[in-house]
Image (cartoon, helix red, strand yellow):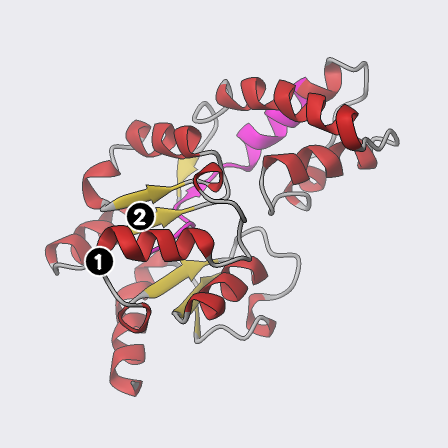
Amino acid sequence: MTAHWSIRRPDIAAAVNELLAGRDLPPLRLDQVKAMIGGGIRKLVERAFAASGTPLLGIALDEANRVMAAIYRRHLTGRTRLMPGVREVLTHLHLSGIAMAVVTNKPQLAAREILLHFRLTDYLGAIIGGDAVTYLKPAPDALLLALDLLQVEPRDTLMVGDSSADVAAARAAGMAVILLRGGYSQIPVEELCADLVCDSLFDLPSAMRRLQDAA
């Protein structure tokens, strides 16, 4: 069960800057937007306007979030690419009989559209977006929903992510967690108290075996 299969920073930055341009605000750099990712679209909008010197609250933030929802849908896959090893590792795990799901704070339709674009949906037993639950990660709600749909127990599952929110959600759900380097975390992944850390997805099968042997 994972939420770290694609590199979307350029598309997300393009969406943020289109939103800001509509308010006659200057664009943000890619590295600035990267630092704002995590917590869902509303949190991204809030951080973007704060970084632009025009923080939004309440109704103004609600309206900007509604505008962003439409913009975001136009910037899902144009500049997005799969991380190295995604298709190879998913194929290996699928052929090994391992049930998989995507759990993300992205809106559900957006997540499904991205996965359809890259022809990954056939590997998955569930796709859970942030709007499918009441509370986003780091709350465990989305993970628990995925477990229910896959009909598996937390002790038999693994969360593969890249952030402190992924670790917190997995722990709250009673799941093991492996983190990948190269994601959105502003804290070194070694400091986030995951069970294991991998340099790339190619390392995931061997890491899973190590966790199983240690259990």
Which residue was labeled with disc 2?
A: 86
Q: Are marks 1 and 2 in contact (CB under 8 Å)?
A: no
Residue at figure coordinates x 30%, y 86% from the top left: 214
Type of amino acid at the residue the image marks with label 1: Gln
Residue at figure coordinates x 54%, y 24% from the top left: 72
- Local secondary structure at mark 2: helix
In this view, which residue lies farthest toward the front?
A: 134
Q: Position of residue 6 (x, y in %)?
A: 42, 42
Query: Foreground residue, 32 or 55?
Result: 55
In this view, which residue lies farthest toward the bottom?
A: 214
- Relative placement, left or right, of 189 versus 114 is right
Q: Is residue 34 magenta?
A: no
Question: Is residue 198 in view from this perspective?
Answer: no
Residue at figure coordinates x 78%, y 24% from the top left: 60
66 lies above or below 55: above
Q: Which residues are magenta?
A: 1-18
Q: Position of residue 134 (x, y in %)?
A: 52, 45
Query: Foreground residue, 3 or 203?
Result: 3
- Relative placement, left or right, of 121 versus 180 is left
Residue 127 in which image quadrant: top left
Q: Is residue 6 magenta?
A: yes
Q: Which mark is residue 151?
A: 1
Q: Residues within 10 Å of mark 2 (few under 14, many from 20)?
A: some
Query: Foreground residue, 101 or 94?
Result: 101
Mark 1 vs 2, N-terminal side = 2
Q: How many marks?
A: 2
